[in-house]
Amino acid sequence: AVGAPTHKVSGPMIHVVVMPEHRARPQGARVEIGAPPVAAHQRRSAHEQLAGVAIGYGQGVLLPGSRFLSAFHGLPGNQALALASGEALFVGTPSGLWAVIGTRVAWRVAAGEGKLPHPWVTSLLLFGDALYVGTYGGGVTRRASRPDGAASGFFDGFVETEGLKVNPGCLVEAGGRLYLGTDGRGLFRLSRDRQRFLALRIPLPSPRITALLAGPAGLVVGTDAGLARLPFSSLDEEP
């Protein structure tokens, strides 16, 4: 099914972003383009209007119009672990973050530049006016546009998340708040002033969170020991 930032299917893992006026419809090993739109992620680029479906998987990213991008075209890696669609198509890989505008790679951030807490980017979420970047082993950082117009933007990490492991699909927005699932440290939520992540003291089948799904009344949390349904009323509010 399509409708969340990342989707697992039989066989190799793929990640799907649906742009306006089209939808992804799995049929065996194929993904066809149809109408109307069925997913929440939409993209309109100021540089080039693209509509359709972008698919990330182990060999790169397939853009609308059957344009394929990989490390050969300047990407920091082939394996796409996360996609987010906004001013650009943002792609997370095990070796960094990159952005596609139209059909070209606009910029990339890789290991050794000091912008990412860890190059293994596993989750992406556009929340408010910023892109939140989850990594496996480095926690979360936030990317915002720079006043000087620098393409890659300004990155600001959250020290309280240093060392946290974030699995694919474990950054979600629910009820107007941002939630973070970690591999071994349970569930976190971004504070209302968006300055820090706070650990939520909520009983879960396991602190190893492997998936988060936002619903109208709460969260569904997937762990390595089963599922938990958390209504918003059960999520304690911070002071």
Image (cartoon, rainbow, N blue to C red):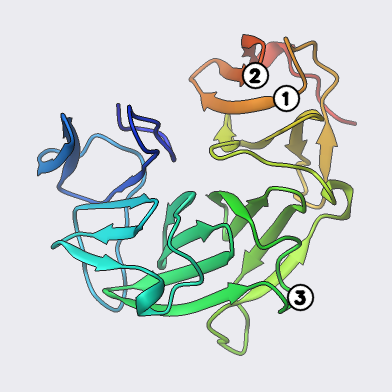
CA separation in Å, label 2 and label 1: 6 Å
Q: Residue 185's spot in the image, x, y percent?
A: 82, 30
User: Within the image, what quadrant is residue 202 found in?
Assistant: top right
Give the labeled residue for mark 3.
Answer: 114
Residue shown at the point (78%, 41%) measured from the top left: 191
Q: CA distance from mark 2 to mark 3?
A: 31 Å
Looking at the rendered structure, which numbered label has been put on residue 172?
Answer: none
Are the residues flagged by discs 2 and 3 in contact, CB closer than 8 Å? no
> Eyeballing the image, is 56 above or below 174?
below
Sequence order check, earlier mark of 3 and 1: 3
Residue in view at x 77 percent, y 21 percent = 207
Three-letter amino acid code at the position of disc 2:
Thr
Question: Where in the figure is residue 110, as x and y percent of width and height?
Answer: 62, 73
- For disc 1, the marked residue is 208
Residue occupied by mark 2: 223
Name the amino acid type tagged 3.
Answer: Gly
Q: CA distance from mark 3 to mark 1?
A: 28 Å
Q: Residue at x 59, y 74 (%)?
A: 109
Left or right of 167? Residue 151 is left
- Label 1 near label 2: C-beta < 8 Å? yes
Q: Quadrant of the C terminus?
A: top right
Indicate which disc, 2 or 1, sits on the residue closer to the N terminus: 1
Dot 2: element = strand
Q: Position of residue 237 (x, y in %)?
A: 81, 25
Q: Residues within 10 Å of mark 3 (few under 14, many from 20)?
A: few
Q: Nearer the viewer, residue 205 or 29?
A: 29
